[in-house]
């Protein structure tokens, strides 16, 4: 009866879809201030921006960018799924839609990655 | 002749049953003889009859009709009378016991028996009561079984108040005022009852504090409802109807 990371009653696909949406939202919210800060640099501080762009050429940072694109994609498609669920007539294929949202996000992230390298 | 405790363990099931009261409790371990065909309720009854006469639990019909036997089995809410041990142990690692606890989200009275009164009060708060529009001296209104409203009501009507969905819902855990899936599902059946006259009263009741807009659409309720009802679908219906009514300033 050890402590489980995800409690048994939550171990079903649609709860996982919920938590993915919540965590990606949180991740994006944390990222936003940084995003605006860099935008600010672009406007006011050319040297600072260059330093930042140089830093962001670092492979690790490049790699993290894909994570960010994935967060954005997963939150976007997951959000569309939720809007459909709440506002369109009910469809029994909820698990399929959740899986589709994740699959599309992977696809978009991979496309971004292929474009970038 | 071997005594109960001496029989080979392979034929015994390791069971951990939560025992306690509203304040505290712990798991107690029991060994229950394994049968080929055995429900969780059989296991609990065996413990109460042969090992622990003071064990408190509820059941009545044993066939999934009354809704009184629900418990958390290996961390998931279910009817104990209609769940077989092999099904409950699926996916559980060898050597781990079968755990049985009282339902989540409800105060414990003793051992496996919860206080259901808060759960039932929420049905009343959600205006889960029929408001007749005709008296007994008038003719009964004919309702076509093919009408959309009747079909929507039918899909949600087979609820037996077992609180499995209520125990599965994290929105209930996070907000003690939240009416929960069962009460809202009930309200939805009445919204779709053409004979009912309490529509706006009910829409206000389910859109206020603790109302349908607290639902996060996680669908744990629909995942676990043993009657295969879909409270999430009913709640999205309520969300839409309450929003429309609010825009039209009817509520
Ligand atoms: S869908 Fe709504 S009512 Fe059902 S478990 Fe989730 S939060 Fe609770
Ligand atoms: S909706 Fe299903 S799980 Fe919830 S109380 Fe009714 S029968 Fe039980
Ligand atoms: S004992 Fe009646 S539903 Fe299980």
Image (cartoon, rainbow, N blue to C red):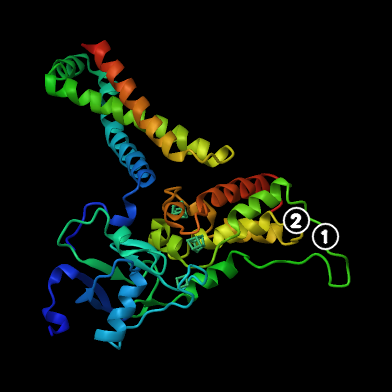
Q: Is residue B86 above or below residue B213?
A: below
Which of the two discs, 1 and 2, labels the residue nearer the N terminus?
1
Mark 1 or mark 2: which is in front?
1
B196 to the left or right of B93? right
Q: Are marks 1 and 2 on the same chain?
A: yes
Q: Secondary structure at mark 2?
A: loop
Chain of the residue that carries numbered disc 1 in the rendered image: B
Residue B70 lies in quadrant:
bottom left
Task: Say the numbered circle drawn on residue B194.
Answer: 2
Q: Residue at x 48, y 53 (%)?
A: B214
Per the image, the residue denoted by label 1 is B141
* Coordinates of residue A110 in the picture (x, y in percent): 28, 19
Tell whether label 2 touches label 1 (CB within 8 Å): yes
Along the viewing direction, whichever of B48 and A26 lies nearer the viewer? B48
Q: Residue at x 36, y 43 (%)?
A: A13
Q: Is residue B164 above or below residue B60?
A: above
Q: Is residue B236 above or below residue B163?
A: above
What is the tally of numbered marks visible in this picture? 2
Residue A4 lies in quadrant:
bottom left
Q: Quadrant of the N terminus of chain A?
A: bottom left
Q: CA distance from mark 1 to mark 2?
A: 9 Å
Q: Residue at x 53, y 68 (%)?
A: B122
* Coordinates of residue B32 in the picture (x, y in percent): 23, 75
């Amino acid at each position: 009866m050890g402590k489980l990371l995800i409690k048994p009653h939550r171990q079903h696909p649609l709860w996982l879809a919920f938590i993915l949406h919540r965590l990606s939202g949180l991740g994006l919210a944390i990222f936003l201030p940084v995003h605006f800060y860099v935008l600010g640099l672009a406007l006011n501080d050319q040297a600072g921006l260059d330093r930042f762009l140089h830093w962001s050429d670092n492979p690790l940072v490049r790699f993290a960018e894909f994570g960010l694109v994935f967060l954005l994609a997963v939150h976007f498609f997951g959000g569309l799924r939720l809007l459909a669920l709440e506002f369109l007539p009910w469809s029994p294929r909820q698990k399929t839609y959740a899986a589709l949202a994740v699959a599309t996000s992977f696809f978009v992230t991979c496309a971004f990655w292929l474009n970038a390298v | 002749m071997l005594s109960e405790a001496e029989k080979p363990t392979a034929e015994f099931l390791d069971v951990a049953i939560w025992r306690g009261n509203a304040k505290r409790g712990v798991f107690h371990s029991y060994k229950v003889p394994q049968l080929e065909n055995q429900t969780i309720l059989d296991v609990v009854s065996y413990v109460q009859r042969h090992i622990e006469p003071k064990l408190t639990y509820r059941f009545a019909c044993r066939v999934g009709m009354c809704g009184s036997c629900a418990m958390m089995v290996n961390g998931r809410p279910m009817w104990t009378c209609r769940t077989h041990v092999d099904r409950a142990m699926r996916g559980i690692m060898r050597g781990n016991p079968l755990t049985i606890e009282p339902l989540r989200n409800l105060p414990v009275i003793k051992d496996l028996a919860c206080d259901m009164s808060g759960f039932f009060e929420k049905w009343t708060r959600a205006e889960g009561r029929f408001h007749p529009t005709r008296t007994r001296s008038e003719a009964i209104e004919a309702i076509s079984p093919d009408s959309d409203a009747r079909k929507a009501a039918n899909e949600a009507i087979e609820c037996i108040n077992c609180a499995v969905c209520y125990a599965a819902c994290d929105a209930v855990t996070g907000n003690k005022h939240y009416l929960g899936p069962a009460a809202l599902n009930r309200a939805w059946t009445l919204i779709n009852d053409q004979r009912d006259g309490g529509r706006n009263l009910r829409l206000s009741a389910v859109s206020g504090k603790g109302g349908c807009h607290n639902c996060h659409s996680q669908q744990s309720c629909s995942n676990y409802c043993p009657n295969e009802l879909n409270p999430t679908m009913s709640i999205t219906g309520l969300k839409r109807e309450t929003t429309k009514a609010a825009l039209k300033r009817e509520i």
